[in-house]
Amino acid sequence: MSGTKAGGKKAAATNKKKYGKDFYKINGAKGGRNGHTGGFASNPALAQVAGKKGGENSRRGWTLISNTDGSLIFKNNKTGELDVKLK
């Protein structure tokens, strides 16, 4: 009967019988009291470290720095190495 309306009503009746008629009221109140400040909101330094790791592992390997005098200058984002290509 699990997953049906009848099964849900039966489970609710069992929970109320076992734990009291305020079972759902008490559990709902517990959920409302829990904090919601986890993750990067509580630690900006951790967010910075994670962002740096993501940027270093990005698939965008090269960035165009200059496009003058008939040559293209690229910089490797991971190593900082420069590469010049002629047009």
Image: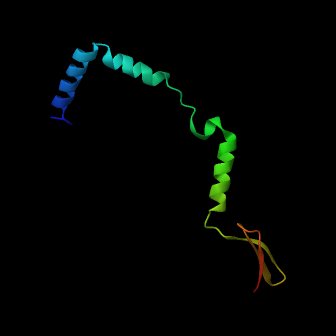
The quarter of the displayed image where residue 59 is located:
bottom right
Find the residue positioned furthest to the right. 69
Q: Is residue 69 above or below residue 61?
A: below
Q: Residue at x 57, y 32 (%)?
A: 37
What is the quadrant of the N terminus in the image? top left
Find the residue positioned furthest to the top. 21
Q: Residue at x 70, y 66 (%)?
A: 78
The quarter of the displayed image where residue 27 is located:
top left
Residue 49 location (% of width, % of height):
67, 49
Residue 73 location (% of width, % of height):
78, 77
Q: How is the image coloured?
A: rainbow
Side of 15 relative to 31 (left or right): left
Q: Is residue 64 above or below residue 39?
A: below
The quarter of the displayed image where residue 30 is located:
top left
Find the residue positioned furthest to the front. 18
Q: Residue at x 42, y 19 (%)?
A: 29
Residue nearer the viewer, 70 or 12: 12
Q: Is residue 36 above or below residue 20?
A: below
Residue 15 location (% of width, % of height):
25, 20
Q: Is residue 16 above or below residue 51?
A: above
Residue nearer the viewer, 64 or 36: 36
What is the quadrant of the C terminus in the image? bottom right
How many numbered markers are drawn? Answer: 0
Side of 69 relative to 51 (left or right): right
